Amino acid sequence: MTAFLPAPHDVAAVTSVLNELVAAWGRHDAEGYGELFTDDATYITFVGTLYQGRQDIVDSHRSLFAGFLKSTELADEILGIRFPGPDVAVVNGRGDTYKGKRPPRLTKIQPYTLVRQDDRRWRIAAFHNTKRKPLTESLSYRFAPGIIPAAEK
């Protein structure tokens, strides 16, 4: 399957959604954060918790922003964007939460699937947050060099 060649404004719109996500997190705005997801979005945390639907994402983040994630910021770095079709974007990125100074190395790998909806707005349909384990990864590469991703060779 060949990737669809997007218009420059589509790349900018997808990037803007992720920038808005970081901004909403910084405001600890659960509703604003949730608005960036589709009504039926799936959201998987790095501990494996699955949230289904925008309201579930909003409710959980309202609690997280008042508790575990109070006073945190969100760091995000886009590694790549591809468009399998005109209304679908797959974004691979790195991210992390932090307090104070932004960490120099982001420890989580985060794929997003965004879709353009009927209102022409791009929203996140799926998100998965995976904690990266560099030591385990390095050892795995040493003992099984065939598993090293092409981007890291």
Image (tube, grey):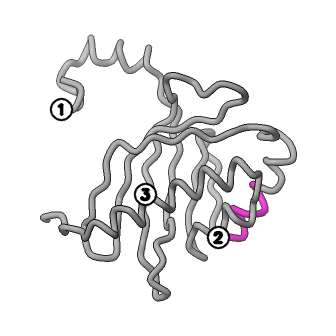
Apparent side of residue 139 relative to residue 135 in the rendered image (left or right): left
Residue at x 33%, y 62% (from the top left corner)? 11
The disc at residue 80 is: none
For the stretch drawn in magenta, the main secondary structure is helix
Element at label 2: loop
The residue stretch that appears in magenta: 53-61
Disc 1 crowd, CA 10 A, few/some/many (<14, 14-19, 20+): few
Which residue occupies the extreme left position in the image? 2
Amino acid at dot 3: Thr
Residue at x 62%, y 41% (from the top left corner)? 74
Element at label 1: helix
Amino acid at dot 2: Glu
Viewer-side residue, 16 vs 37: 16
Look at the picture and state if 29 lies above or below 107.
Answer: below
The disc at residue 150 is: 1
Identify the residue position indicated by label 3 in the image: 15
Which residue occupies the extreme bottom position in the image? 118
Residue at x 75%, y 52% (from the top left corner)? 27
How many angstroms separate mark 1 from mark 2 (CA)?
36 Å
Identify the residue position indicated by label 2 in the image: 35
Q: Position of residue 123 (x, y in %)?
A: 50, 70
Q: Position of residue 139 (x, y in %)?
A: 35, 12
Viewer-side residue, 13 vs 70: 13
Circle 1 or circle 2, nearest the eye: 2
Circle 3 or circle 1, nearest the eye: 3
Look at the picture and state if 145 lies above or below 12.
Answer: above
Amino acid at dot 1: Ala
Q: Quadrant of the C terminus?
A: top left
